[in-house]
Amino acid sequence: MDFLRPSTWDEALAAKAAHPDAVPIAGGTDVMVELNFDRRRPPALLDLTRVAPLTEWGTDGDLLRVGAGVSYRRIIEELGSRLPGLAMASRTVGSPQIRNRGTVGGNLGSASPAGDAHPPLLAAGALVELASVRGVRRVPVDGFFRGPKRSVLEPDELIAGFLVRPGGAQQFAKVGTRNAMVIAVCSFALSLSLETRSVGTGIGSAAPTPLRATEAEEFLSRELDWEARGPVPPSVAQRFGELVAAAASPIDDVRGTAAYRSHALSVLARRTLAWAWKGFREVGP
Amino acid sequence: MRLNCTVNGEARQADDVWAGESLLYVLRERLGLPGSKNACEQGECGSCTVYMDGTPVCACLVAAGQAEGRDVVTVEGIADGPVQQAFLAAGAVQCGFCTPGLVVAVHDLLARDSAPTDPEIREALAGNLCRCTGYEKILDAVRLAVQR
């Protein structure tokens, strides 16, 4: 096995083009588990921890651009107020040791249906920036996932970062057996934009890929009293929960049953709606 | 491949390192530092916690090559500190397997926060599993280390 250690982004892209079978590694919280357990023997590892631009974030027009190598810990500490939904999800990732190393880029690269960063990125309508020696493309995150642990990432591409519009009210909730070290039984993220009067959703761990509940989004954006920010009628919250649950296609597995996941999703949808709307009513956009 | 890094303040070198092996393996099997324990190998248990460039990480999840040129501090490197003494005094050690990882995690917590609350202690130690003590005496040890 080779160990490729680029120190610049151009070197990293050249290395990936020359070694399309090389497995990129950043925090190692997924890749090293597969190596330690003999589940994977790639011909090469491509270490991205020395590529400085991956660990930077900044603005890109009216979007926030976050490098793929920014750790969960830094998302929480540095971007908590700008990306509250993603920060909430980041706080539920693993343990302090894991959050010190794990990255959102790695989460996207693994493309697990249970990835904690995915629902808030879906709810916020994030773009994933993919790069290769051929060029750069930005893919809406709801078109990024292709199946369990599969994405549209080409063999010569690397994930450069993600772009998201900050602002609005965001919430995230996750079901698991304890507060730390939990792979989601199911999770849900909600994003409400007063400016565009739009609703964003993201469902985790309840389908072959993380996904949006588009019908639920359309329903809620029609029904919410955006003008006066009046209370959400219980029937609307109820229907929103049902539509979120209906968008998922969960299975029975070691972490929970399909029926439980559907029920829990409808509860998480109602709760996050109540929290997010309360935030709007109290402090405004 | 050859690996160069600083371990506990000393420049160290390891040869014939396989690209897929972990920093934990290098520390234990190549550099003679068995303080960091090998248990779950998936970042769940925290018994291999070490500092890398000042940040606590699971050594089992760091590829050896990622440690090239980095500054690693293991439990051996902080062996004279008050945290171990507090663990002994409080009876927070039973089988002892989780202790090295907990010592590093507590060392880091106290370096960041000299007066952590109980929820903050629990949060800081959420990535370190102990199957013997039920954690109460570990919490006692942290409170004792804070007092001292």
Image (tube, helix red, strand yellow):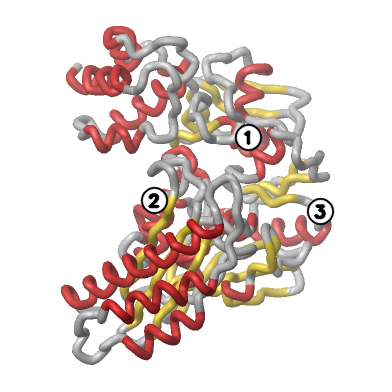
B57 versus A15 height, above or below: above
Q: Name the residue under label 2.
A: A91
* C-beta proximity under 8 Å, tags 3 and 2: no
Side of A247 relative to B102 (left or right): right
Q: What element carries label 1?
A: loop
Q: Position of residue A124 (x, y in %)?
A: 44, 73
Q: Do labels 1 and 2 share a chain?
A: no
Q: Name the residue under label 1.
A: B68
Q: Which residue lies most toward the front here?
A: A259
Horizontal and vertical percent for residue A195? 32, 87
Q: Earlier in the sequence, mark 3 or mark 2?
A: 3
Q: Quadrant of the N terminus of chain A?
A: top right
Residue A53 shows in this picture = no
Element type where label 2 sits in the image: helix
Which subunit holds the residue at mark 2?
A: A
Q: Residue A278 carries which label?
A: none
- C-alpha separation, residue under disc 1 versus residue under disc 3: 23 Å
Quadrant of the image occupied by residue A78: bottom left
Give the mark toward the camera: 1 or 2.
Answer: 2
Number of residues whose C-alpha sits closer than 10 Å to that of mark 2, classed few (under 14), some (14–19) or many (20 or more): some
Of all chains, the one bearing label 3 is A
- Residue type beneath disc 2: Arg
The 10 Å Cα crowd at callout 1, few under 14, some 14 to 19, many 20 or more, is some
